[in-house]
Amino acid sequence: MALSFRQSEILEIARGEGRVFVEDLAQRFDVALQTIRRDLTDLANAGLLDRVHGGAVPRTGVSNFGYEERRGMNEAAKAAIGRACAAAIPNNCSIIMNLGTTTEAVARELLFHRNITVVTNNMNVANTLLANPGCDIMVAGGALRRSDGGLVGDLTSEFFGEFKVDYAIMGVSAIDPDGDLMDFDLAEVRVSRAILKQARQAFLVCDHSKLGRSAPALLGPLSQMAVWFTDRPPPPPLARSCDDWGTEVRIAGV
């Protein structure tokens, strides 16, 4: 399919931000809503986007974006989520942090916390927190993925079983409309499940682009999370479910 200039721009925005909205695009390009809907339909028919309510998301299939591409997506939102989550973490506590570029944003905001212990299977988190002399760092064993600095496997899961921490800070790849937390790598999901068992409270750090994405591996329900830090209010049905579950939704200012 030969893309028009506008369609090419829409595709780049979707890949950079993780999601596009019909009304936002119509205003940006100064065209009618129906024109944007046709563009999104054409891009979906070409296998480049998936239509979701109110807009579209990049086509993901059964594999995630590359690590560097994910790192560049929604940087401002991730930074704001990182600040909000870190502000909820006190000094003098223990934390487990799993894989993900948003958990890495949280790590950058923990550099001035005092007397904390961080247990992680994320080498990028560990390397970031080396700059904090008030942080003891415990790194899991396991198979190291060169693609993103993550450690996964049975050794990793067993390692986390040795701890009981105050907080788990969790990133995910996708959230189903019913609140199921999804990811692309079953080995990574098994590690994340082990992490959740070892934390007194779990915090989800996840921006709006993960809503409406699809991923094949089920981590568990959003109801397991005490707080969900995100950058935009979730759809009303999911917001009501969070209220029913007792999962607090905190919107980070970008």
Image: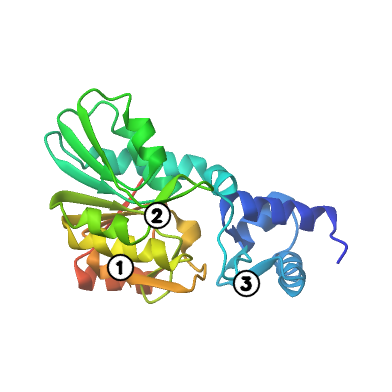
The residue that disc 3 covers is 51
Marks 2 and 1 sit apart, C-alpha to C-alpha, by 11 Å
Can you tell which quarter of the image residue 57 is in? bottom right
Residue 73: x %, y % from top left = 55, 47
The residue that disc 1 covers is 222
The quadrant of the rendering that contains the C terminus is top left
Question: Label 3's element?
Answer: strand
Are the residues at dot 3 and dot 2 in contact (C-beta closer than 8 Å)? no
Marks 3 and 2 sit apart, C-alpha to C-alpha, by 20 Å
What numbered label is drawn on residue 38? none
Q: Is residue 117 visible?
A: yes
> Which amino acid, by three-letter code, is at mark 3?
Arg
Q: Residues within 10 Å of mark 3 (few under 14, many from 20)?
A: some
> Which amino acid, by three-letter code, is at mark 1?
Leu
Question: Label 2's element?
Answer: loop
Q: Is residue 234 visible?
A: no
Precedes in sequence: disc 2 or disc 1: 2
